[in-house]
Amino acid sequence: MGVAIDYLLLRALFATIILFGVAHGAKPIFVFGDSYVDTGNRNYSEAPWRNPYGITWPGHPSGRFSNGLLLTDFVAKAMKSKSPTPYRFYTKYSRSLRDVVKHGLNFGVGGSGVFQAFDPRNFSVQVDQLKGVLQTIPQQLFPLEHTPVLVSFVGNDYRYYLATNGTLKELPVYITKVVTEVTRNIIRLYGLGLKRFVVGNIEPLGCVPSLTASVSYKRCLTTYDPLVQFHNQLLAQQLNATFTALKGADYFILDQYKAFQSVIANPSPFGIKHRLRPCCTPKPGNIDSCGEVDKNGEPLYEVCSSPETHFFWDGLHPTQAGWTALTSSSFVGGNSPHNKSANLATWLQNEPTS
Ligand SMILES: *[C@@H]1O[C@H](CO)[C@@H](O)[C@H](O)[C@H]1NC(C)=O
Ligand SMILES: *[C@@H]1O[C@H](CO)[C@@H](O)[C@H](O)[C@H]1NC(C)=O
Ligand SMILES: *[C@@H]1O[C@H](CO)[C@@H](O)[C@H](O)[C@H]1NC(C)=O
Ligand SMILES: *[C@@H]1O[C@H](CO)[C@@H](O)[C@H](O)[C@H]1NC(C)=O
């Protein structure tokens, strides 16, 4: 009985709170994806909650796979808003509910893919989590059609596929399945009432330090270029076709491929001196060991002295400086047929034209 009453009170409180939040111009966003967007959904025992993650900001690990801020934080900034609450903390708040949801929620989790990858919380599970939330929050009070969605899955499906028994020969078929699963979930989100989508394509996979370590971080590997190009082309095509049918909806392709290419080709305007060598490197004999210690507590990694001069932080992820550079360049223009000349920051602040 007590539980039931509390629940009703909570709902009423939520309704008031959300109205208040909206009336005062809070700008929520919902985020789906992997470690490039995750701001704290991994468990406390895991790497992004261990040193040296977060050394630049906030000065201790924050659950981000970065030395500081990452994509989600910069997108929130572009909206003149704050980073959304990681879903893991949604029900574990000590702050008021209004404070918890007014900037939206982040369902993205490191290691995930749209299919089975290194974390089981695939895109569809993340969408189910939002669905669950919306069943608790009175929907008519939440400005769903004005709330942008950021979707960024950047290759864990392929890393997992190749790390298990996937063959290169069957890869094109798998790529088609992956892209179709991305659009299928975007359609599900549209079905929940969401209308504004920022969709990231995938970065040049062969440039990540865990792969370029084999060539002493001297150049990007080209092995994966056809995969990446096919994925990105297909994604652009499917989005174009899909959104033609989604009434009142719009999208913006966050061209991470172009952004990575352009920053890696010309990093100096951003104060970046090391394009491919990450700041946090494995000690000899280790692979991807940033955040790992041996049984005596000795780090299995080394941290550079100036993270702000490195584009990459660890084996897979950009530094805060890297994300600053990436977002300043990819924010310059979108390439969806709907908004060729728009800049993401402007697009995010504009109302949809339905
Ligand atoms: C993270 O914690 C949750 C809840 O404690 C647990 O169910 C889950 O298995 C953990 N995940 C991993 C990857 O350890
Ligand atoms: C996502 O994970 C859920 C739960 O494990 C599973 O039921 C579902 O089939 C998965 N979806 C895809 C597309 O793999
Ligand atoms: C590996 O191959 C087998 C047989 O082709 C298949 O049933 C299985 O799903 C594959 N495993 C993975 C992880 O792809
Ligand atoms: C988008 O789709 C339309 C047809 O619906 C087509 O004419 C156009 O060329 C497509 N644009 C791109 C960039 O694929």
Image (cartoon, rainbow, N blue to C red):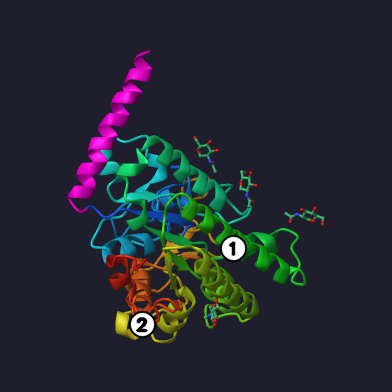
Residue 69 position within the rendered picture, expressed as x and y whole percent measured from the top left: 33, 61
Q: Are marks 2 and 1 in contact (CB under 8 Å)?
A: no
> Label 2 vs label 1: CA separation?
48 Å
Q: Residue placed farthest to the top in the image?
A: 1
Give amino acid for label 1: Gly
Q: Is residue 40 visible?
A: yes
The residue located at (59%, 63%) in the rendering is 285
Which residues, given as a range, are shown in magenta? 1-25
Side (left or right) of 34 relative to 163: left
Residue 158 sits in quarter: bottom right
- For label 1, being within 8 Å of ligand 1 is answered no
Which SS type dominates the magenta stretch? helix
Q: Which residue is mark 1?
A: 285
Residue 75 on the magenta segment: no
Secondary structure category for the residue under label 1:
loop
Rendered-image quadrant of the N terminus? top left
Secondary structure category for the residue under label 2:
loop
Crowdedness of circle 1 by 10 Å Cα count: few (<14), some, many (20+)? few
Q: Which residue is mark 2?
A: 341
Residue 216 position within the rendered picture, expressed as x and y whole percent measured from the top left: 55, 78
Rendered-image quadrant of the C terminus? bottom left
Tag nearer the camera, 2 or 1: 2
Residue 328 sits in quarter: bottom left
The mark total stands at 2
